[in-house]
Amino acid sequence: MNTLTTIEELGFAPALQQDVLEDTTSDHALLEATRSGDQDAFAELVSRYRNQITSYIYRMTNDYDGAVDLAQETFVRVYRAADRYQRSYAFSTYIYRIATNLAISELRKRKRRKLVSLTGFFQPSDGAEAKELNPPDLRPLQDSELVDTERRNAVQRAISTLPEKYRAPLILRDVDGRSYDEIARILETSEGTVKSRISRARGFLREKMRAYL
Amino acid sequence: MRNNNCRVVRQELDELMLGEACSSSAAEHLRECAECREFNQQQTRLRQIVGSLGTVAAPADFDFRLRARLANDSSGTAAWLFTRRGFAFATVLLIFATGAVLMRNVLNRPAAREEVVTTTPSQVPVPQPPKQVETPEQNALVNSGEQVGGKPLYRRPQTIRNEQASTTVAKAPRRLVAEDFSGTGAQVINRQEPASAFEAFSLDASPQSFKVSLDDGRGNARTISVPTISFGSQRMLQTGNQFAPKRDW
């Protein structure tokens, strides 16, 4: 009878190595490494989330340069607060929460400054129906790609007119495809509230996008 | 009943992920209800459009700019911490200084009150009247009761009352000395004494003014001149008809 001399002979060595490999490349592990001064680990985190966070903030603010700036601010805050990070939530929830807060702060700043984009919609302050500055041309376009582009622009403008409390859950759900549970944790609210807000947001959008549906 | 069903089905459709199959009851309701079917089609189309927005890519220099920003922030943070520490230090110093001043005031205040309480008329220390610098000759004259030019040397009497003294002590933080005259008898003028014991002078005497010389000790001498008191043409006598009607004088 042959005796086993090495652990590889047990047959589950590859699975064990895979687990260890996954653990070292998880978001939590990368943040732990960042905390201990590993710059490459932080660079890996940035490369994983930079597009998602930039896109999310862009959908929230409808301003690409500002979104890039706020996305960088998000990573700066993650880096600074790496020592205080707790593993109770997923890292994605954590970073999306920071991004959401920054985006909402930016929207409120704009509201105070009465900053209105000339290419967007005029949003009345009393909650009445928003007026579109540049109404869509309802005539059919020849090129389907142009039609899609026009439709996407229209829906992006329509999203930017939504109140911020409806905007964030709608983007997280319909653009990023996140679960209600995760959205509730990101927005620090209940799942029922998230569902209700998403439903209201879709109702608003349906009214605004009636010409495209 | 049907409206209720529509609301439930629409809520279920709303909560589904895009492309996810609905329940059999909802599917059956959709086959029967045209409004809900239209709602489902519009909702699906809307979600497809919104979902087609996709992800916007970050710029190529995102990492580079982020590194530069982190480097700037770390130096900025150090400066901010330094400024903040300096500010905190200045604040602590200010608080200590304010506290010291307050403490000093608090410590001084009870002492003044205690002094007022313990300063009863019987315990009032014998006042040291304002020291008047007098020439040796004047001192000698005052002590011996002699007169200068036929008149006694004038000294301003201390007429501070006890209440006034106490009030003054309570207000002033310094230690004040008050003179208590309650135990000192006033000078009594006795009628039985011979008139010559009192000063009686004729009004037609030369109107020589009464003068007192004062020296403040720093070489500044002052002379106070008190004019002679005049009672008109009558003669002031310490006699029995002193209190008689004026016309009898």
Image (tube, helix red, strand yellow):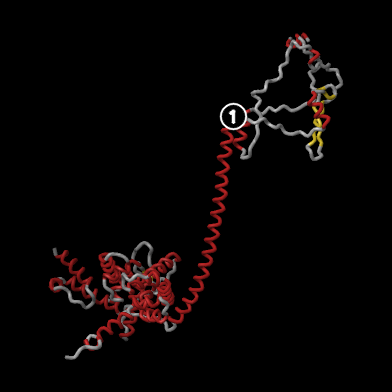
Quick check: B78 left or right of B136?
A: left
- Amino acid marked by disc 1: Thr
Residue A95 screen position, x and y as percent: 36, 73
Would you place residue A42 above or below residue B179 in this image? below
Dividing the picture into quadrants, the one containing residue A143 is: bottom left
Residue A126 screen position, x and y as percent: 36, 61
Depth check: give the residue in front, B125 or A166: B125
Dividing the picture into quadrants, the one containing residue A58 is: bottom left
Quick check: B24 left or right of B237?
A: left
Q: Residue at x 17, y 74 (%)?
A: B22
Depth check: give the residue in front, A106 or A71: A71
Confirm whether residue A118 shows in the render: no
Q: Quadrant of the N terminus of chain B?
A: bottom left
Depth check: give the residue in front, B102 or B83: B102
Dividing the picture into quadrants, the one containing residue A96 is: bottom left
Q: Quadrant of the C terminus of chain B?
A: top right
Say which residue label 1 marks.
Answer: B120
Residue A121 screen position, x and y as percent: 38, 71
Circle 1 packing at 10 Å, graded few (<14), some (14-19), many (20+), is few
Quick check: A66 left or right of B228?
A: left
Q: Residue at x 38, y 65 (%)?
A: A124
Q: Chain of mark 1?
A: B
Confirm whether residue A96 shows in the render: yes
Residue B69 screen position, x and y as percent: 47, 76
Would you place residue B171 above or below residue B13 in this image? above
Would you place residue B95 above or below residue B63 in this image? above
Would you place residue A109 above or below residue B211 in this image? below
SS of the residue under disc 1: loop
